[in-house]
Amino acid sequence: MRKIYLAGMAATLLLASCGESNDALDTQLTDSESVEQAAISFAEGGATNGEEYFSGIVAEVVGVDVKFREVTELDKMDASAEEITAVLDEGKQKIADGRKALDMYADASWPKRKEFHDLTLEWFASIESLIDTYLYDLAAPMSKADDERTEEEVDFYNEYIVALEEYYEVDNRWVDFPYEYASANGFEIGGTIDEDAMVSEELESAGVE
């Protein structure tokens, strides 16, 4: 059976390029802890301008995407269904938290904010659909070695692979949009967030090897 190797956003998620950290929301997202702290600040209304809003959205999306990638790694490792399901539950909670955080800025007037808001909600919905429609039911098959999976499980897994294409389309639009948003708000973006390292960090902290 084919395993999923997500292209995702690890190499393309960009950071706001700024000379120093902002007081309200630290834009230096370098590891799981800094992403989590930025998401917390964002959810508490810490974004006071368009650049901080950008960093807050990135933190929320990275938090969800890391959980999505963890599932891929757990699949490769034939981790237990319980471990996979726990990560899916965490991903669903982060999506819910992200939506609530975005709602706090619904009246903000920064250029292109509404477009960024709507596209991020679409991205959340795309991931959530994969989780609800496929991944919870695939937790048990993913926990097995390839040659132990039934024909029905293989067929369902392949349906998931096809469904990923719709997610990739949304994901690609989300990755492209920050350039347009940054230009409209008068700041530059540069550098990348190493999500692969964050996934490894999360799995290690959870005791998964």
Image (cartoon, rainbow, N blue to C red):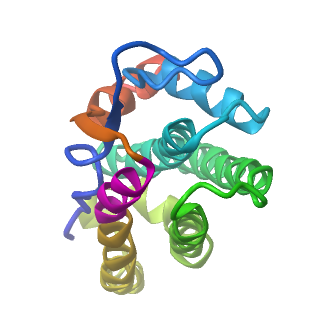
Please state which of residues 172 and 53 is positioned toward the viewer in this rendering: 53
In the displayed structure image, the side of residue 50 where residue 24 appears, left or right: right
Q: Is residue 157 visible?
A: no
Q: Position of residue 108 (x, y in %)?
A: 72, 54
User: Residue 49: x and y, percent?
Assistant: 60, 39
Residue 21 is a magenta residue? no
Residue located at (61% from left, 45% from top): 82
Residue 97 location in percent, x, y?
74, 47
Q: Which residue corresponds to the image point at 37% horizontal and 33% vertical from the top-left?
A: 199
Question: Which residues lie in the magenta part?
Answer: 175-185
For residue 119, say whether it is visible.
Answer: yes
In reply to whether residue 181 is colored magenta, the answer given is yes
The image shows residue 119, relative to residue 80, as above or below, that is below
Q: Residue at x 78, y 52 (%)?
A: 100
The quadrant in which residue 60 appears is top right
The mark tally for this picture is 0
Specify the quadrant that holds the N terminus.
Answer: bottom left
Using the image, determine if residue 91 lies above or below residue 22: below
Q: Residue at x 24, y 65 (%)?
A: 147
